[in-house]
Image: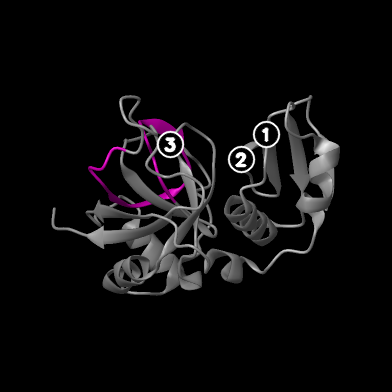
């Protein structure tokens, strides 16, 4: 683990993997350290912004680098908000995902619905959350050739993640469904439905 000053108002914590990010993010969120303004997780980093009138990167370093609980233990603390996403499972790649996994389409859907996910971090586009916690049997690679247009609300999987496209975008994830729940709305506070740490469940609804 390394703590790197990032200007005079932030520190970037580099860790080994996503599990370490999740554990660090959850425990720091619960700790509410004086002067810390925002925690921005990534795949292997956590950006900690702070008020320089209250603290500094050097002052925060001992707290940021001390041993942390495993992610499951950290997330078992105060319960994060739960977002339920109504989903019609008729994605363009659903049959292909079934073929790749060797599962019937109905079981692919059942396994995706059964899991509880956590927003590990956000990126790619405003409102796009990288959700972890899915069934390992549903891990499939990205498409060899990305689509130039994926519709807003598309529910998709790739590798160990599930995501929901917040608007029409290019993308190479495999589409298994769609939702009418807007992922990003500037008139909402916060604009994003899926923020790091949020728990997520997908609810199957009829077309």
Relative height, residue 1 to residue 98 (above, below): above
- Mark 2 — residue? 40
- Which residue lies at the image location 30% right of the left edge and 25% below the top edge? 187
Coloured how?
one colour
Q: Is residue 20 left or right of residue 165?
A: right
Lower position in the chain sequence, tag 3 or tag 2: 2
Gap in Å between the C-alphas at discs 1 and 2? 8 Å
Residue at left offset 50%, top offset 53% = 197
Q: Is residue 59 left or right of residue 179?
A: right
Local SS, label 3: loop
Outermost residue, left side = 206
Residue 181 sits inside the magenta stretch: yes
Q: How far across and how far down the image is residue 1, in percent?
A: 83, 53
Q: Residues within 10 Å of mark 1 (few under 14, many from 20)?
A: many
Q: Which residue is mark 1?
A: 49
Q: Is residue 2 above or below residue 137?
A: above
Nearer the observer: mark 3 or 2; the answer is 2
Region in magenta: 163-182
For marks 3 and 1, the one nearer the N-term is 1
Which residue is tagged 3?
127
- Vertically, is 195 above or below 166? below
């Amino acid at each position: 683990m390394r703590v790197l000053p990032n200007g005079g108002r932030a520190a970037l914590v580099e860790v080994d993997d996503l599990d370490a990010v999740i554990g660090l993010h959850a425990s720091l969120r619960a700790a509410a350290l004086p002067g810390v303004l925002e925690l921005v997780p990534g795949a292997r980093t956590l950006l900690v912004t702070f008020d320089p009138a209250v603290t500094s990167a050097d002052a925060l370093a001992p707290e940021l680098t001390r041993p942390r609980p495993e992610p499951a233990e950290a997330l078992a603390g105060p319960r994060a908000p739960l977002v339920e996403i109504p989903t019609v499972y008729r994605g363009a790649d659903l049959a292909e995902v079934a073929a790749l996994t060797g599962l019937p389409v109905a079981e692919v859907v059942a396994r995706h619905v059964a899991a509880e996910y956590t927003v590990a971090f956000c990126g790619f586009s405003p409102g796009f959350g990288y959700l972890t916690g899915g069934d390992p049997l549903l891990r499939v690679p990205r498409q060899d050739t990305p689509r130039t247009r994926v519709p807003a609300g598309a529910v998709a999987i790739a590798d160990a993640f599930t995501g929901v496209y917040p608007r029409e975008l290019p993308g190479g994830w495999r589409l298994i469904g769609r939702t009418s729940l807007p992922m990003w709305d500037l008139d909402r506070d916060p604009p994003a439905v899926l923020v790091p740490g949020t728990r997520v469940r997908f609810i199957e609804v009829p077309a």
